[in-house]
Each structure stands twice: as C-alpha cells, then as structure tokens.
C-alpha cells in the first residue's frame, strides 16, 4: 500500500490533459510505441471526434524510482460540466491531482471549479505548467496566477510539455514524492468506492472501484450498499491498458469488477461495494442519485418508427444510466418520448448516437429545465415540459433551478460579459481580479438561461477569452408564464416555452420573427402568433409561395449543413408536417435561439 499513488488530472478543456497522460503512459512503458495512439484514453469514437473526454476511465502504471517499484493509478475525469458528479467521485478516489494549466492561456473556469473539488477532498495538488514549448507561452504571468490560486511556491510548479515530453520525469517523481500513499485498514471490512462504470454488451457492466478498506477476492459475494443489490465477483483485476484479471485487489488500489450486470442503471457511481458476509458499517459519504437537468421531447420524423425508436431508447439506456425517458404524446408531433439529460452536451450525444448507432432520424424539441409548481391547495407539481404547466389560476408560485456561475475573462470584456449575464436574469455576487488583465466573475442566475446557447454567446462577446462553469444552488421562485405559439391558428405544443413574464412579450415577438425566417413558404399564407393564455402578444405572417423562389439556404454551421445534405440524400429529412405546414428541426430549436 505504501507504494501506491492514486491521482487524477485537473485541466481546462484543451490545456493538454490527454496529451500529457499519453506521455506518462509512454514514459512508464505502460504502452508500447506500437500501441501508442494519440489520445489513448479517449476511446469512444464520439469522444475522439469531439476532442473531449466524455467518460472517465482509469489506467495503472508501474514506475521505478530510487530502486523502489510504485503502482500509479491515473483516474481520468470528464472535462464537461454535464458530468460534474462523475468528476467529484473520481476525485474522491484519489489522494492527489495534477493541476495542468496551459502556459499560453492561464487559469480558466473549469480549472478552478475542479480544483475546488480537489481541495475539498484534501487532495495534494501538483501544479504543472504545460505547453511551455509554445512560442507565445507566458510562463511568468501564468506561474503568478497559479501561486495566487493555490498558495504554493514558484518552485512547486513543474514546467512541462506534452508535445516534447519535457518535464514528464519530474511529474512522475512529484507524484511519488508529494502525493501521500493511500490510508485505510487492510484487514477491515471491505469498503470500495465505485467511481465509474462502463457498459460492455458481451461482458456486462464493468464496475471501476477504489478500495478504501479491506480487500476483495475473486468469487467473493459482494453487496452494493446504496442499491442493496448483491453479486458474485466473477472477475476482478487491475486496469492496465487492457484489463488484467487478479485473484485479489487490496486496500488503496484501483480495480474493476465484472459480475454479469446487464444494465448500466443498476450500477450507481458513488455507491459503496462491501462484502455480504462481513459488511462495512457505513457507506462512503457523498453518494448521490444523479438527476437529469435538461428535458426535451424526442420524436421520430416518421411516425411509423415510434416502436423502433422505443427499442433504440431501451438499448441506449442499457449503457447510459443517466438517460431517463418516458413516453409522451404531442398534439403536433404524435407519439414520442420526454427525455431527461444531464445537460446539453449529453442531449447532443444521445441524439447523435440515435442517428449513428440506430439509424433513427429524430426531431428534438426545445430543451427545458425542471420547474416546481406549487398549487394553491399545497400540491407540488413537477413541470418537465411546458405542457405540464398547471392552470395559472390555481397556481400559488413556481420555482426554477438556479446556478452559481463562474466566469473568467479578460478585463477588456468585463462590461459585455456582465451585460450578458444581467440580460440572462443574473445577479452579480463577486468580481475578483486574478491578475491585472484577468477577472473572475461570480453570478447567480437561472439554469434555464444558460442551458442553450449562453456559452456560445459568451465566447462571441469575449472574442473567445471567457471560460464558464457552474454548479446548481437550488430552486427559487420566479414569475414564469407559458408562452404558446400558434401556427395557422393551431397551437403547436412542441413550440411552447416557459419564460419569465417580463421577457414574454419580447420573446414571443422574436420567436414569431424567427419562425417566419426558418419555415419555408408554402402554397398559402401562414400566420404565426405568440400568446399567453388567450391573449395574443405577437404576430408574423409567412407569405404564400410565388414562382421562382430560390431554394432556401440554411444558416448555421457547415457540419449541420453537411448533415442535412446527407439526410436529404437518404431521402429522409428531419422535417415534420404540422397540420398542413412543413417544419424543419431548425424551427423546433428556434424557440430558444432568439434574442
Ligand atoms: P480535453 O480532452 O478536451 O479536455 O482536452 P485536453 O486537455 O485533453 O487537451 P489535449 O491533450 O487534447 O490537447 C489539446 C491540444 O493542445 C491538442 O491540439 C494538442 O496537440 C495540443 N497540446 C497538448 N499539449 C501540448 C504541448 O505541450 N505543447 C503544444 N504546443 N501543444 C500541446
């Protein structure tokens, strides 16, 4: 146990976490050159394409230092806020963290939020300044930022480059010398923390764990404390480049367990594994049932494909425990599903997987957050879709989720960033100068205002010099109303939205204008109206089609356009007939992309 080191890497997206991890694996000869592929840890195709780590994994390295053999377990953490609970459990499984900061970029919002998590868990922080090979690197300034942030000495910071391999030896030495060995009672009852699980259609769910106390042997009868389920430890082992079966995994170590579990949702990250016969007294603290934060309807483009979509959703849920769904009927779109996601990235991943892996063409309705409605008679109603919104006459109040947003930006852009946050109903809580040129802003704001395109807007107004992260702080009462959209005098439930009363008029007007742009002209005139209850607050008209109208050119980015073309080639468009009006996917999202 004294020669084990468990660590994770904290870094903002693109600061070079994966590249540096690859160098560590190379240096310790965990992978041979032949096996070495770029960004080895990002194994899912989707991950590779997006260049972001979606699911966390772990890998074990052997390292000899001063004649002593060490086992180093690197626990990878996902970089996106949608998966922050997984990050927190990975951190809980470690004694130390490499804090990687890009020498040309400095500290960013994601760095800070994950760093705080690591400090909360008493992790030893090893600051690494990466990309020192870059000509425009700014090591002095960035080092000052790091010193200020974690109150370390300048000498504690390791300069490194994932590209050239500089500093990798120093990092490994620091892992051994600075990070404490795991503690725990090797003879105590088994207590192991599940920090991740991966679905494998052949072997069942692979459970990744870190043993806090006791040990686990192949064939043991184990129990997952929070779910109460029992299993046989059919196979256990170490997570090398490939899984290596072992007879026993001991205190302080990281390993995997396979016991024929068929569904991802049976295994909950954060749960505690113990022995059936000699159970531990308490579960490891910090377990949470992750709850979806964003909800949207998913409908087949072709109504005939509903059952096929259901089968695909069921399969997806087998390997994605955080996806929840239930059947939903929309007057406009027919039969489909109301789905809950961890966030917008998760939603996009699911939509993409449905299309790629299951060959489904789906329409996604505008995402919304979960609202809590309290009725006059005291009843609480959960509102996951605008159509769930109760009759305003019977409503006492409605509450919406609020977040604490952390934004780091260049001083030049503080004005526009504050302006944007206030427009999004934010309240500024704090403003700190990290250096003379970089400012951290803390806002409290409604989650609904950031789920969709807040980050894109932030990037635009700051010319890319802003990073953003958030955490949920609870539900607060707001003046919210349901905004209905009528197409050709018919209310289209898939277009309705829950909005703040003070923004309703403006939103209604803009949604109508946007829909007028994105819905193709047809043979007849189409009125578009926005209404609250029976009161129409805005109206636009799509004129009837004349001859010689050039084919509509879609806006948006090139990949969307390419996708659309591919779809059309297949003869199936992401398009739905609403009454007698044809509407594209773009229109369904238009409700959100206005302002
Ligand atoms: P996410 O997985 O998205 O969080 O990114 P990451 O932090 O893992 O970054 P990644 O390793 O993918 O590196 C991001 C980009 O920086 C890639 O284009 C790398 O080639 C480049 N990069 C990484 N390390 C270095 C370095 O030390 N020097 C230089 N010049 N480029 C680097």
Image: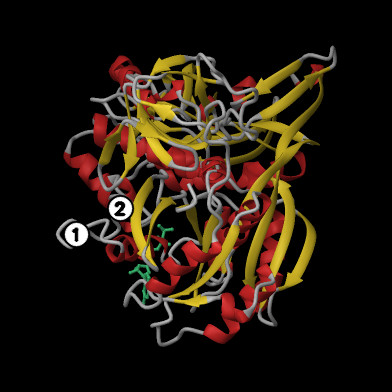
Which one is in front, 365 or 547? Answer: 365
Give residue 18's position: percent from left, percent from top. Answer: 37, 60
Circles 1 and 2 in contact, beta carbons < 8 Å: no
| Residue 194 in sight in this render | yes
Give residue 514's position: percent from left, percent from top. Answer: 51, 47
Q: Which residue is drawn at 65% across and 55% down?
A: 119
Which one is in front, 330 or 440? Answer: 440
Q: In this view, does 566 lie above or below 146?
A: above
Say left or right for 344 vs 47. Answer: right
Q: In this view, does 392 lie above or below 74?
A: above
Residue at numbered disc 1: 32
Which one is in front, 216 or 22? Answer: 216
Give residue 500's position: percent from left, percent from top. Answer: 73, 40
**Label 1 secondary element:** loop
Displayed quadrant of residue 524: top left
Quadrant of the picture in which ligand 1 is shown? bottom left
Identify the disc placed on residue 48: 2
Which one is in front, 567 or 550? Answer: 567
**Label 2 secondary element:** helix
| Residue 553 in sight in this render | no
Identify the disc placed on residue 325: none
């Amino acid at each position: 146990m004294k020669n084990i080191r468990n660590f994770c890497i904290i870094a903002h997206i693109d600061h070079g976490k994966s590249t540096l991890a690859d160098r560590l694996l190379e240096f310790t000869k965990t992978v041979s050159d032949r096996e070495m592929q770029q960004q080895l840890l990002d194994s899912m195709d989707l991950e590779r394409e997006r260049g972001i780590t979606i699911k966390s994994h772990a890998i074990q390295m052997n390292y000899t230092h001063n004649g002593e053999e060490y086992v180093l377990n690197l626990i990878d953490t996902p970089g996106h806020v949608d998966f922050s609970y997984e990050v927190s459990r990975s951190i809980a499984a470690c004694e130390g963290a490499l804090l990687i900061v890009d020498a040309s970029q400095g500290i960013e919002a994601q760095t800070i939020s994950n760093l705080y998590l690591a400090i909360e868990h008493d992790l030893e922080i090893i600051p690494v300044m990466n990309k020192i090979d870059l000509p425009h690197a700014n090591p002095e300034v960035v080092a000052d930022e790091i010193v200020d942030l974690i109150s370390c000495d300048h000498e504690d910071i390791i300069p490194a480059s994932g590209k050239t391999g500089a500093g990798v030896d120093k990092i490994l030495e620091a892992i051994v010398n600075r990070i404490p060995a795991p503690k725990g009672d090797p003879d105590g009852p088994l207590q192991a923390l599940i920090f991740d699980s991966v679905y494998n259609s052949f072997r069942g769910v692979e459970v990744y764990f870190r043993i806090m106390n006791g040990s686990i042997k192949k064939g043991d009868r184990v129990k997952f404390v929070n779910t109460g389920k029992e299993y046989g430890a059919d196979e256990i082992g170490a997570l090398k480049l490939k899984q290596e079966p072992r007879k026993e995994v001991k205190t302080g170590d990281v390993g995997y367990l396979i016991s024929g579990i068929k569904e991802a949702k049976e295994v909950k990250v954060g749960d505690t594994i113990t022995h059936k016969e000699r159970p531990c007294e308490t579960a490891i603290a910090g377990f949470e049932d992750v709850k979806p934060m964003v909800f949207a309807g998913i409908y087949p483009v072709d109504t005939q494909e509903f059952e096929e979509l259901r089968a695909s959703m069921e399969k997806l849920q087998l390997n994605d425990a955080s996806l929840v769904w239930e059947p939903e009927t929309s007057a406009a779109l027919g039969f489909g599903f109301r789905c809950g996601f961890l966030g917008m990235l998760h939603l996009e991943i699911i939509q993409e997987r449905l299309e790629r892996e299951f060959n489904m063409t789906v329409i996604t309705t505008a995402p919304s957050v979960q609202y809590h409605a309290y009725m006059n008679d005291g009843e609480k109603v959960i509102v996951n879709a605008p159509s769930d919104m109760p009759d305003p006459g019977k409503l006492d109040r409605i509450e919406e989720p609020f977040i604490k947003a952390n934004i780091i930006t260049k001083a030049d852009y503080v004005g526009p960033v504050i302006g944007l946050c206030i427009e999004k109903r934010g309240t500024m809580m704090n403003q700190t100068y990290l250096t003379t040129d970089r400012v951290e802003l803390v806002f409290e704001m409604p989650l609904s205002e950031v789920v969709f395109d807040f980050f894109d807007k932030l990037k635009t107004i700051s010319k890319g010099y802003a990073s953003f992260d958030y955490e949920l702080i609870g539900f607060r009462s707001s003046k919210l109303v349901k905004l209905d959209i009528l197409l050709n005098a018919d209310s289209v439930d898939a277009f309705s939205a829950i909005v703040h009363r003070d923004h309703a008029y403006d939103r209604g007007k803009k949604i109508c204008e946007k829909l007028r742009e994105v819905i193709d002209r047809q043979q007849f005139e189409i009125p578009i109206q926005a209404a609250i209850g029976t009161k129409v607050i805005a109206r636009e008209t799509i004129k009837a089609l004349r001859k010689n109208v050039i084919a509509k050119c879609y806006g948006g980015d090139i990949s969307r356009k390419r996708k659309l073309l591919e779809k059309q080639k297949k003869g199936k468009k992401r398009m739905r007939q609403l009454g007698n009006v044809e509407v594209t996917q773009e229109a369904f999202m238009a409700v959100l992309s206005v302002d």
